[in-house]
Amino acid sequence: MHEPADIFSAIADPTRRSILEVLATHEALAASDIYDRYPVSPQAISRHLRILREAQLVIVEKKAQQRIYRINPSAILELENWSAGLRKRWNQRLDALEKVLDEEWIKTRGNEGLEGRHDAD
Amino acid sequence: MQIDRLTELTITRVFKQPREFVFKAWTDPRLFAKWWGPGMFTNSACELDVRPGGEIRLDMVAPDGTVYPFRGVYDVIAEPEKLVFTGGSFLDEAGHPQLESRTTVLFDDVDGKTKLTVHTVIIKAVPGLEQPLSGMQEGWMTSLERLERVLTQYSNE
């Protein structure tokens, strides 16, 4: 069994990010067209494309002698959802922090609590 | 398309308290355990070794008793201005986190209040985490609802 590829590790690499951004602005690109855009060897780009493929961030289609690459919209949608969930969790975490800070502040300040701070303003 | 937008997050919020006080809520184990984690969860065994390279160990316990350990390492500590840590949860059998991120927290003094900036970058997230995460999401929601009740009470006073 092949270990499932991790989308975020795949994205962490700047070249792979760049390939994804290039693919996002094109309908589809042949592997050779992608190679031409980078100063590094085709082998290196081919390795990056394989990692993106394994993470299912891109879809490949074989046409005659060519491999045509497209971005996988469902993977990007999944990332969008993930990103929205992350923001929600952090906001809720900071809500909880705010509550703890208010409670602790009142405790350390006695009855003055937050009111005391308003007076100081 | 901006890939960064999907893997990094920046949130800012202003808290009424001075930054020394807010910083303490991130580094005092008793306080940290009170807010880090979903609302219906309790935290046990919170240990914070607050120095560069020091460990963060926190066990989050779900209402059904499932323990979700959170493990991290402090990278930068500049009290009371800045805190950087790399942390992970959903550990596999070997103790490797399935979800890992690096978080930078900035504490800016704004007229005695604190402007907090959280910048987090996802380093790793293996597939198949959606289900446990959405379970935790429900825990967070409950926490938010409780907070809203508390705030409503305050504003009615």
Image (cartoon, grey):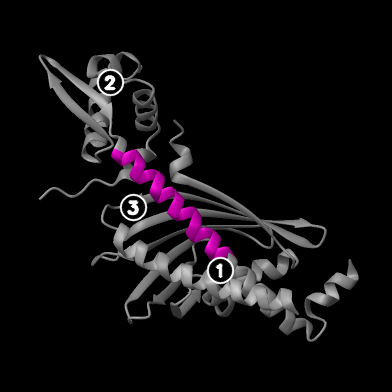
Pointer 3 local density, CA inside 10 Å: few below 14, some 14–19, many at least 20: many
Report the predominant secondary structure element of the magenta stretch: helix
Across and down, in percent, residue B83 comes to 59, 58
**Identity of the residue drawn at 13% across and 47% down:** A2
Figure check: A53 above or below A68: below
Q: Which residues are magenta?
A: A74-94
Question: Mark 1 Cα within 10 Å, few/some/many (few <14, many 20+)?
Answer: some
Who's the residue at 44% across and 42% down the image?
B6
Numbered disc 2: what chain? A
Label 2: how many Cα within 10 Å (few below 14, some 14–19, many 20+): some
Query: Which mark is in front, 1 or 2?
Result: 2
Please state if B121 lies on the left or on the right of B119 as rendered.
left
Mark carried by residue B50: 1
Q: What chain is tagged by disc 3? A: B
At x 65%, y 66%, the residue is: B23
Comparing B92 with A26, the one in front is: A26
For residue A28, which numbered disc appears in the image? Answer: 2
Q: Nearer the viewer, residue B47 or A76?
A: A76
Residue B98 rendering spot, x and y as whole percentages: 31, 58
Task: Give the structural element (helix, strand or loop) at label 3.
Answer: strand
Tag 1 and tag 3 share a subunit: yes
Name the mark nearer the viewer: 1 or 3.
3
Give the secondary structure at mark 1.
Answer: loop
Is residue B37 at least partly visible in the picture?
no
Residue B137 placement: quadrant: bottom left
**In this view, A36 is above or below B90:** above
Residue on which the image places disc 3: B125
Q: Quadrant of residue B96?
A: bottom left
| Side of A26 where B153 appears, left or right | right
For marks 2 and 3, give the one nearer the viewer. Answer: 2
